[in-house]
Amino acid sequence: MVVTEQQSLADMTTMRLGGKARWVIEVATNDDLLLALHFASERNLPWFVLGDGSNVIAKGDYEGVIILNRIAGFEKIDEDDASATYKIGAGKVWDAVVERVCEANFSGIEAMSAIPGRAGSTPVQNVGAYGQEIADTLVSLDAYDTNSNEFVTLSRDDCEFSYRNSVFKNPVTRHHIITSITLRLRKTQMTPPFYPALETYLGSHGVTDYSPQNVRAAVIAVRAEKLPPVEKIASAGSFFKNPIIDKATAEQLLLEFPDAPHWPMGEDKVKLAAGWLIDQAGLKGFSKYGMAVYPKNALVITNQYATSSSDLEQFKSEIIDIVRDQFGIILEQEPEDLSS
């Protein structure tokens, strides 16, 4: 366990905003985690668990304890004719996990290649991309329950997954710190139809073998074209959730914009593409307050030179207002706010 003081939150989050964290504790084991929580408790301080900060917006200083989850582990615990099951430490780099699984020729998470962050973060917002999401493969997870003060195992159903949401993201129900995830992966390949951008890439490159390795390579190439590298350009990846609206509202929108990307979600709901809405509103490349809408992908906000989260807040609000005024649809922020 490593304890430091007064560390820059901008250095710990990919949007590169925020002030100082009063304390930062890096944990590598379950015992470390208990010690970190005790450290916060005896000082009556709040705490926040952080992976790589790729889906978190820091606001000002954090007068508490940032717990950096670096709990390792990667073990195949079961295999049969159809699948293999892996138990993975929450602190493992997610893309390294995807790479190892694809090299072993197992399918289920290859479309989530090149997503920044740690494995333990994926259930929090039910991470997904190009037709796959963590809820599809997650069997269970281990976590520390801060209500009962014990380590517990939660099933997939316990996680209450929905689109970019889970029991771990809801402020009312979040009281678990994830320490490992268990995934069941298939021995069968993904099959068409794929999401349009992935379908286009596979077709244009003559890829007909949809092995995990080939799909992973295609996803990495597509993401490189559409998303800024966080190590070079400050961003939090996709900044807005794709809005889910009722079918009647979607039908009205499609009468005026028949080419609008949309996907049925069941229960008379339809998912729209937030990036398309922002682009159609003429905001791709829009910049203000030191922030900008990424020219290659309107779903991404980049930090050009802003130093305050208030700059981002003003910029975000203007985008939301313009899209609402033009389409009657309110966009919601995807990254989580971190504030004392």
Image (cartoon, rainbow, N blue to C red):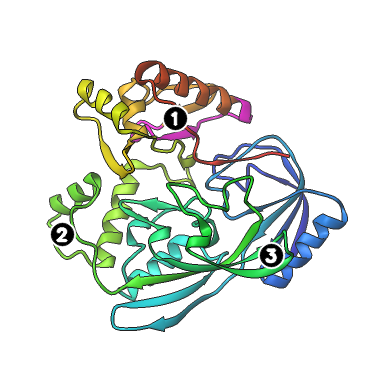
Camera-side residue of 20 and 280 = 280
Q: Is residue 144 above or below residue 254?
A: below
Percent position (x, y) of residue 108?
34, 65
Span colored in magenta: 294-310
Q: CA distance from mark 3 to mark 2?
A: 42 Å
Q: Are marks 1 and 2 in contact (CB under 8 Å)?
A: no
Give the quadrant of residue 327.
top left
- What's the residue type where badge 2 is placed? Val
Element carrying mark 1: loop
Tell me the chief SS of the magenta region. loop
Camera-side residue of 268 and 194 = 268
Instruction: Classify residue 122 as left or right of residue 188.
Output: right
Q: CA distance from mark 1 to mark 2?
A: 35 Å
Percent position (x, y) of residue 36?
76, 62
Which residue position holds label 3?
Answer: 27
Which residue position holds label 1?
Answer: 331
Q: Which mark is residue 207?
A: 2
